Amino acid sequence: MSYSKNALIGIIMGSSSDSKTMKGAAEILDTFNIKHEDQIISAHRTPNRIEEYAKYAEKKGFKVIIAGAGGAAHLPGMIASNTLIPVIGVPIMVYNDKRDGKNDLRFSSFGGLDSLLSISEMPSGSPVVSVGVNKSINAGIYAAKILANEFPELKKKISEYKHTQYNSVVKESIEMKKLGLSKFVLKKFK
C-alpha cells in the first residue's frame, strides 16, 4: 500500500464555505505527496451520509479522517462515533459570505470557540482530536505524522519539513538582529 497512490486520508467538511479553511489540510498533504479524498458531508443537512461515509472510509482503507465544521460542529464527532478510524477535528470560525450578494463578511460572535468546544468536548468513549480554530494545516501535518508511523520515507519528509521551518526562523532572527526590530518590521510587513 502506498500513501501517494491510494487515498489513506479523507478530508470532509460540513459545507462548501468550509473549503476555504480546509484547503490548508489538502495543501500540506499535497506537499508530502499524500493522496487524500475530499467531500462535503453535512451533519445537519445530510445526516444519513455520515454512516455511509464512515463505512466507505473503512472499506477504502483510510487511516485518518480530517473533519472540519463550524458552529455546533457536529460532523467530527458524528463521524468518530461511526468508525474506528482516528478523526482530527478542525473547528471553523463561522462567517456568512452569502448575504444578499454583498461583499461584507459577518463573523460569528463566538470567534470559533463554539466549534472548538463542540469538537474537543466529545463524551468519553468517542474521542476526536482537535486542532485550533481554522488550523487545518495542523490537522494535515498531524495526519501525516500518523501515517509516518507506517511509512519511513514519509517520516523523513516530515523531518525535512521541520528542519526547513527551523532554518527559516534562524534566518529571520539573523536578519532582525542585523537590521534592528523597527527596520525589520518595515521591510517584512510593508
Image (cartoon, helix red, strand yellow):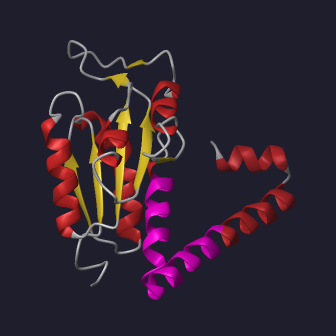
Q: Is residue 129 above or below residue 141?
A: above
Question: Is residue 141 on the magenta stretch?
Answer: yes
The C terminus is located in which quarter? top right
In the rendered image, residue 140, in percent from the top left (x then y), is placed at: 43, 59
Position of 18 relative to 157 (above/below): above
Frontmost residue, 7 versus 123: 123
Residue at the farthest bottom position: 153
Rendering quarter of residue 178? bottom right
Percent position of residue 101, x then y: 21, 17
Secondary structure mostly seen in magenta is helix
Numbered range of the magenta stretch: 137-165
Q: Is 187 rendered above or below residue 35? A: above
Asked if residue 46 lies in the magenta stretch, the reply is no
Quadrant in which the N terminus appears: bottom left
Q: For the view shown, which residue lies furthest in the top direction? A: 100
Left of 43 or right of it: where is 124? right
Q: Residue at x 48, y 63 (%)?
A: 141
> Is 49 on the left-hand or right-hand side of 109?
left
- Left or right of 165? Residue 86 is left
- Where residue 148 appears, as percent x and y from the top left, is 47, 77
Question: Looking at the image, which is closer to me, 188 or 22?
Answer: 22
Give the side of residue 66 with respect to residue 176, left or right. left
Q: Total of numbered circles in the picture?
A: 0
Q: Residue at x 31, y 19 (%)?
A: 103
Dividing the picture into quarters, in which one does residue 60 lie? bottom left
Residue shown at the point (37%, 31%) measured from the top left: 73
Residue at the image point whose x is 24% and y is 21% from the top: 98
| Residue 105, percent from left and from top | 37, 20
Q: Residue furthest front?
A: 125
